[in-house]
Amino acid sequence: MADIESSFEFSSSFTSSSLPPPRTRIFKIIVIGDSGVGKTCLTYRFCAGKFPDKTEATIGVDFREKVIEIDGEKIKVQLWDTAGQERFRKSMVQHYYRNVHAVVFVYDVTNAASFRSLPAWIEECRQHALGQEVPRILVGNKCDLRHAAQVSTDLAQQFADAHSMPLFETSAKNPYGNDDDGGRNNSDHVEAIFMTVAHKLKSQKPLVLSQPPCGSGDTVTLRRQDEEDRGSWGCGC
Ligand SMILES: Nc1nc2c(ncn2[C@@H]2O[C@H](COP(=O)(O)OP(=O)(O)OP(=O)(O)O)[C@@H](O)[C@H]2O)c(=O)[nH]1
Ligand SMILES: [Mg+2]
């Protein structure tokens, strides 16, 4: 399991005696949903560019990072791949929601129960005072198994609309994100989904890099501008 506490401070590659660190923005995106929907595979696919050879149930949280470039700016996308199983998440759930910039809700299109669980995941966000300004997206995974689908696109779209979220249907497994019926363009590429989130975040109010006083080490901490304005993350609920 990854070291939770270290995730709240972001190391720069510069020491305090060298040039100031570059203003690399870091977007923390948490990925939540029932166990087995494919959160680990999706995050691995985005960061490593391929479907993992094998996965096990996530315990606590795993972090994956990828540096992307948008309009000439390098941005670090930090994905928090959370455990779907209650027994593996309850001790650290409050850490997931700390300073989060976006939430990705995942269900499995072949598993209706995972879709029915979505209100509970939304409620968990609400209970952890996630502000309404935090973008949320809905991802239906395993579209390569379209023949076994239990959740129709129409139903998922209705749910997404009701919660003001964009819907993406995808496959972490299929190299092109297209369906097993040979049709293209009916599914979204994993890469495009996370890039869309990053674009959305980039277009929002800028994040501010808070730098520690000289001599206090070589770390920088990210805070949102509105967090600094209000003194807290706040809740728009
Ligand atoms: N066919 C298919 N299988 C997938 C896909 N994504 C994940 N899987 C499989 O689904 C199973 C669960 O995937 P994980 O990524 O470990 O699921 P998870 O949501 O991280 O589960 P927890 O860590 O327990 O919360 C694994 O056997 C994966 O190989 C997909 O897009 N298509
Ligand atoms: Mg997992």
Image: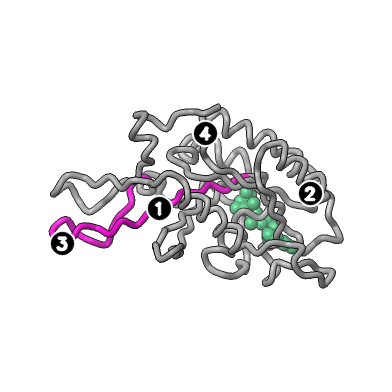
Q: Is residue 74 left or right of residue 42?
A: left
Q: Amino acid at mark 1?
A: Ile
- Find disc 4 in the rendering and name its residue: 130
Lower sequence index among marks 1 and 2: 1
Lower sequence index among marks 4 and 2: 2
Disc number placed over residue 26 in the picture, else none? 1
Residue name at image x 67 percent, y 51 percent: 139
- Find disc 2 in the rendering and name its residue: 111
Q: Position of residue 133 (x, y in %)?
A: 51, 37
- Find disc 3 in the rendering and name its residue: 18
User: Label 3's element?
Assistant: loop
Lower sequence index among marks 3 and 1: 3
Dot 2 crowding, Cα within 10 Å, few <14, some 14–19, many 20+: some
Say above or below: 88 vs 14: above
Q: Position of residue 218 (x, y in %)?
A: 22, 54
Dot 4 crowding, Cα within 10 Å, few <14, some 14–19, many 20+: many
